[in-house]
Image (cartoon, rainbow, N blue to C red):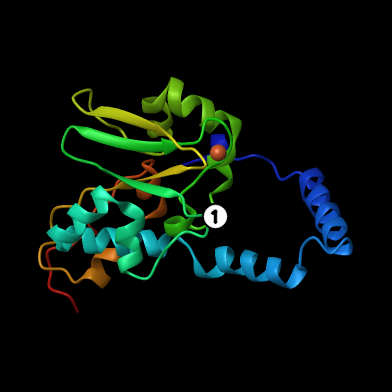
Amino acid sequence: MSGDFKDPREPGPALRVKALEELLSAKGIIDPAALDVLVDTYETKVGPHIGARVTARAWVDRDFRQRLLEDGAQAIGEMGFGGMQGEDLMFLPNEPGVHNMIVCTLCSCYPWAVLGLPPTWYKSAPYRSRAVSDPRGVLREFGVDLGNDVEVRVWDSTAELRYVVLPERPAGTEGWSQDRLAAIVTRDALIGTGLIRAPDGAGAPAP
Ligand code: FE
C-alpha cells in the first residue's frame, strides 16, 4: 500500500512542461521527434521487467551476481541493458538480517536503466523525508513488517550514483527457470519497499 505517498495530479507542472517543450522546439533547441522517442523508450520499453530479469539471473548465476555487485552498470550491459546517462549503478543485496531501501531525498534520482520511470510516490515529499526519518514506518505502510533483528539500510541516490535493491530469492523456488523467477520480482522489491514471496504452491513443478 502506498496511498499516503500519492500526490494528487496537478495540472500546473504538466502545463509548464508542455509550454517549455513548445518553446524549446520553436527555438530549434530540441527535436520533438527525438523527445518522443526518449519518452516512449522509458514509458513502454524500459521498466521493472528489466530489473526483474537481472535479479533472476543473479539468483541462478553466482558469477553474474558477483559481477553485478562489483559493477552494476557493466553487468547489466552484458545482458544488453544500460543507462543513457552513463551513471553508476550499485546493486544492494538484501540478506538475512539486512534490508535495503532506496530514496532520493533531494529530488527523484532513480535507477531508470533497470526500472524505467519512478512511481509518483517515490517523488513525493512524504516518501523522500520519511524514508529517512521513519523507514520502518514507511515499510509497514507498504505491508513490509520487519522484525527488530533486521537492520534497515536506507540509501540516498544521486544523479551520479543510482542504487537498486537486489532482493532475496524466496524459499520454494528451487529449480525454477530464470523466466519463472523474473515473473515474481516486483518493482517495489527492487526499490526496497516490497518483499518477494513465492506464490502458493511454489514448490510444484512448472506447468
Ligand atoms: Fe534526485
Q: Residue furthest top?
A: 133
Residue drawn at x 30%, y 33% is: 145
- Is residue 127 among the parts visible in the rendering? yes
Query: Measured from the top left, where is residue 79 in percent x and y?
Result: 32, 69
Q: Is residue 74 left or right of residue 147?
A: right
| Front-most of residues 128 and 4 | 128
**Which residue position holds label 1?**
117
Task: Give whichever of 5, 83 is nearer the camera.
Answer: 83
Q: What's the residue at 65%, 39% (across, down)?
A: 7
Residue 85 drawn at (x, y percent)? 52, 55
Question: Is residue 198 left or right of 101 when viewed as pictured?
Answer: left
Judge the density around disc 1: few (<14), some (14-19), many (≥20) Cα neighbours within 10 Å: some
Q: Is residue 84 above or below residue 34?
A: above
Q: Is residue 36 left or right of residue 170?
A: right
Ligand 1: which quarter? top right
Q: Is residue 184 visible?
A: no
Mark 1 element type: loop
Q: Is residue 105 left or right of residue 99?
A: right
Give 76 or 198, whichever is nearer the viewer.
Answer: 76
Q: Position of residue 78 (x, y in %)?
A: 30, 67
Residue type, label 1 = Leu
* The C terminus sits in image quarter: bottom left
Residue 133: name its quadrant.
top left
Residue 198, compared with residue 152, is above or below; it is below
